[in-house]
Image (cartoon, rainbow, N blue to C red):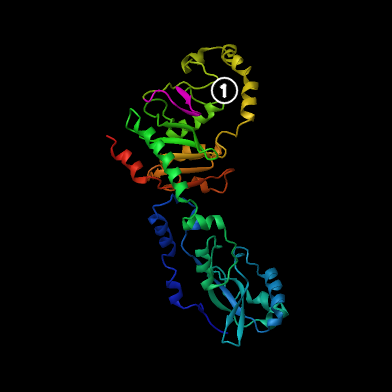
Amino acid sequence: MASDVSLEPEAKKARLNNTSEELLEKIKEEATFPRPVLADEYTRDFEAVQVYAADVKDKTQTSQLIRVLNEILPLKELRHLRRVRCCKINDDESLLQIILCVRSEKEADNSFTQLIEQNKTAAKSLGRPFVVDVAKHPPLTREQFNQASIFWPVNFHEDKYVSRVLRGDLFDKDEVSLIEKFMRMAIAEAKNMRSRKFPIGAVIVDPQKNHPIAACHDLRCAGHPLQHAVMVCLDLVAHSQSSGAWKLNCQEVNGAWALKDKGSQSQQRACCCGRFYSKDCSSVQKESLDERFTHCREPCNLLKDTDNKCKSMPYLCTGYDLYVTREPCSMCAMALVHSRIRRVFYGCSDNITGALGSRYKIHTQTGLNHHYEVFCGVLEDDCRTLFERTP
């Protein structure tokens, strides 16, 4: 079959326009469950790439042709494509077509024909090459699979969990009510702040017991500039495990750690061994080396007791969920990676510094040694109102 254009009509291509955008809009319109923040690969628009294909003259040589082409013209970046497709001519006849190679603008269009002509089986069994559009990326969702299949058959192994997330079937009504309950706790923490500059509240919950482990609000204006709500909440969890980086004025009430003073907090840092001392940086710089070690000798003697306690507990936030009224920044998002958080639920987005959906998607980066799930839009209007009332 001779042709220099794609076999698919333009009408089929038109169906794919804005399909991914429609999927995103459908997710956003659903208000009965938290919206997932997925990697861009799950919602990207369909992209096509052109390849050369040819009719298979002798169907009995199909298997041999596949082996030959995989050797001389491997599809290294298009392994998600099936090499051969079957096209029905009528009810009784069908035609097999096979992909030869990717069309490259840098090379002459007939550069690959020399390799084919050198192989007798390929030269005799293949028809004249033609150009066809195929899916550039492997499909990760059912929707992407349907789009890609319009052009050329692809391999697809559906992730049932991701499909449930995209359909909004991940949470039932009782689970949504529980999620909103903990977000209301975070909102209450934000409202209890004396300073209204950063009205952000956070709660970390053990989902196995449905019980909060720590609850707090932002301390940037009252304590240390790095004491974002998420960072303080993580430190409170560390306090529950006899550790922590800041000397927070906190207490444990009914198994949950919270701040005592809603207005101000000390900026003192914790000793490396888990105990605190109140010397400031200026005085420490004037001390001798022996005097500096004196502060840590006594805490170091308590390491064994601390280690024994921590052995019976998960590492920091392993298996825990975070509820925060505003989208975390890059610092907080990375701290959540290191703390091994399980899931993050936030209310309103932060278009300036948001790192879990707005500006970046740190939780989807492939190079990280831990990944967590992120959901947004939980009581979104209530969370956004906190900032609208900020003077």
Q: Residue at x 53, y 48 (%)?
A: 365
Decide whether residue 16 is among the magenta residues.
Answer: no
Q: Is residue 65 above or below residue 141?
A: below
Between 179 and 100, which is closer to the camera in this rendering? 179
Quadrant occupied by the C terminus: top left
Q: Is 197 rendered above or below residue 167? A: above
Q: Is residue 208 left or right of residue 189?
A: right
* Residues shaded magenta: 248-262
The quarter of the image holding the N terminus is bottom right
Q: Which residue is found at the position 68% from the left and 79% from the top?
A: 117
Looking at the picture, how far across and down is residue 188, in whole percent? 37, 34
Q: Quadrant of residue 325?
A: top left
- 249 is higher (above) or lower (below) than 87: above
- Using the image as rendered, state which of residue 170 and residue 104 is in the foreground: 170
Q: Is residue 323 visible?
A: yes
Disc 1 is placed on an element classified as loop
> Would you name the residue on which mark 1 appears?
272
User: Tag 1: Cα neighbours inside 10 Å, few (<14), some, or many (≥20)?
Assistant: few
Which residue is drawn at the image coordinates 71% and 73% (left, top)? Answer: 68
Specify the quadrant of the image occupied by residue 156. bottom right
Which amino acid, by three-letter code, is at mark 1? Cys
User: Quick one: which residue is furthest to the left in this view?
Assistant: 391
- At 53% from the left and 55% from the top, the residue drawn is 162
Task: Assess whether residue 253 is covered by the magenta stretch.
Answer: yes
Residue 133 visible, this angle? no
